[in-house]
Amino acid sequence: MNIKEYISSGIVESYVLGLASNEEQLEFEQLCLNHAELRQAKEAFEISLEQHALDNAVAPPAAAKQKIWSQLNLVATAAPEVNMEWAGEKVQPLAPVRSINFAKLLAAASVILLVGSTVLNFYFYNKYQTSIAKLDEFIASNQTLVSNSNVMQAKLQQYQNSFEMMKDPSMSVVAMKGQAVAPQSLTTVYWNRQTKDVYLLVNTLPQPAADKQYQLWAIVDGVPVDAGLLNMNETNGLVRMKNIPKAQAFAITLEKKGGSVSPDLTALYVMGKI
Amino acid sequence: MSNTVTYNEQELVLSLKAKDQQSFSYLYDNYSGALYSIVLQVVPDKELASDVLQEVFVNIWRKIESYDPTKGRLFTWMLNVARNLAIDMVRSKAYQNSQKNQGLPESEFFDKSGSATHLSVDNIGLKKIVDKLKTEHRVLIDLAYFKGYTHEEIAEIESLPLGTVKTRIRSALTQLRVYLK
């Protein structure tokens, strides 16, 4: 920051006259610590302001000072009264005889009641605030529980559907064993002979590179037919693939993202015959 | 009878913080006129201004502990106390009502405290200098400094963009510094 520009920006006057915002004030005070120039500019403006005000003074009414002094219980002419205090000879005025009358008593009692009730109000208000805060907490945690439970139910539903499909007697199970590229890989195709639906279960497959994607192929009379792409984020349970009316085998290859028209047989991961 | 003790700023502040009455009396004698003139620029009625001045000195006496000399001179602090209390007065319900009442011809009660006791404030103190500013600047300084509106409020009152209000006030203030010298 150019401190000269800052000084001539009007901030000095703004700060001294109390027109600067809180942020501006903080910044100004920070900068004052490190810039003697800025402090000098501020001081100079303050002095000229003070001088100007003194030059343009308007005498207040004569009684004003006395009023201030009596409001503050200050001693107007210091000397004599201070002496009296010091000598301890101040004459104590006679205390007036107090007559407690009923109205006063009532007033006092009502003041006490008012104070008491105010205190209680405060107390109950605080309690109320705490309860509200606690209630909010409970509502929030309840909502978390409900949404967790929804997630769990959806998952459960998914697994149940998978299980129901596996149980179907018209379902053929094709275990696809790992090939040379990744011998540990294993997937399973569930092929419904009646509906011709194809579901894939990923037992284990290596995580593909970001620009690659697994593609399922159905081998139909020796020709590979595209049976759909596998999204690795959705491999919980059975994944529905493309409908295949007829096939002798299934295979998975690793292809470029978005899939290929014909499989890259050098990246054959798993294969299994029906 | 009259004490000829003089204080430098630091001594004065220390004595005031120690609640030394003599220093407070010195402060009043030397600064009440300057502060009264500031108050009058916001509250033109002499009697009301004198009430505000009373409030100002009561505040100075009671709140002197909160004055931080590292932030500015004593007078700057007192000036801000005076300005704030004067603006508070002008904004008070009582004052607003009395202004309305003064406008009514049948109101005899307020007539006496009306124009007769108003100083022509345009010729005193800072206002005299502010009057040297360009109109567009003068109006904004008047609203910001003497009426105590925030920049946002002024932008609304004058239907100007906030940025324009800020730049105009800043450049008006740099002008003021030049005039004060």
Image (cartoon, grey):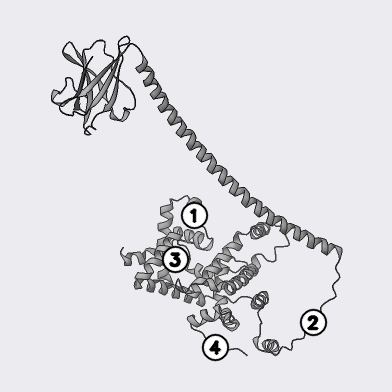
Please rate how many residues cluster around mark 4, counting C-alpha atoms within 10 Å: few if below 14, some from 14 to 19, many from 20: few
Question: The residue marked by circle 2 belongs to what chain?
Answer: A
Q: From the image, tell me which residue sits under label 3.
A: A15
The numbered mark at residue A93 is 2
Where disc 2 sits, the SS reads: loop
Q: From the image, tell me which residue sits under label 1.
A: B154
Q: From the image, tell me which residue sits under label 4.
A: B5
Name the amino acid, label 4: Val
Residue B145 in the image, given as x and y percentages of width and height = 50, 63
Where disc 1 sits, the SS reads: helix
In this view, A80 is above or below A117: below
> Can residue B106 be seen in this snapshot?
no
In this view, A153 is above or below A274: below
Please rate how many residues cluster around mark 3, counting C-alpha atoms within 10 Å: few if below 14, some from 14 to 19, many from 20: many
* Extreme-top residue of the structure: A194
Sequence-wise, which precedes: disc 4 or disc 1? 4
Name the amino acid, label 1: Ile
Q: In which quarter of the image is the C terminus of chain A?
A: top left
Q: Do the residues bearing badges 3 and 4 touch, measured as CB atoms within 8 Å?
A: no
Please rate how many residues cluster around mark 1, counting C-alpha atoms within 10 Å: few if below 14, some from 14 to 19, many from 20: many
Question: The residue marked by circle 1 belongs to what chain?
Answer: B
Question: The residue marked by circle 3 belongs to what chain?
Answer: A
Name the amino acid, label 3: Tyr
Give the side of residue B124 with respect to residue A110, left or right.
left
Q: How far apart are marks 4 and 1 (CA)?
A: 46 Å
Q: How far apart are marks 1 and 2 (CA)?
A: 58 Å
Residue A13 in the image, given as x and y percentages of width and height = 43, 67
Question: The residue marked by circle 4 belongs to what chain?
Answer: B
Q: Nearer the viewer, residue B20 or A192?
A: A192
Residue A116 in the image, given as x and y percentages of width and height = 72, 58
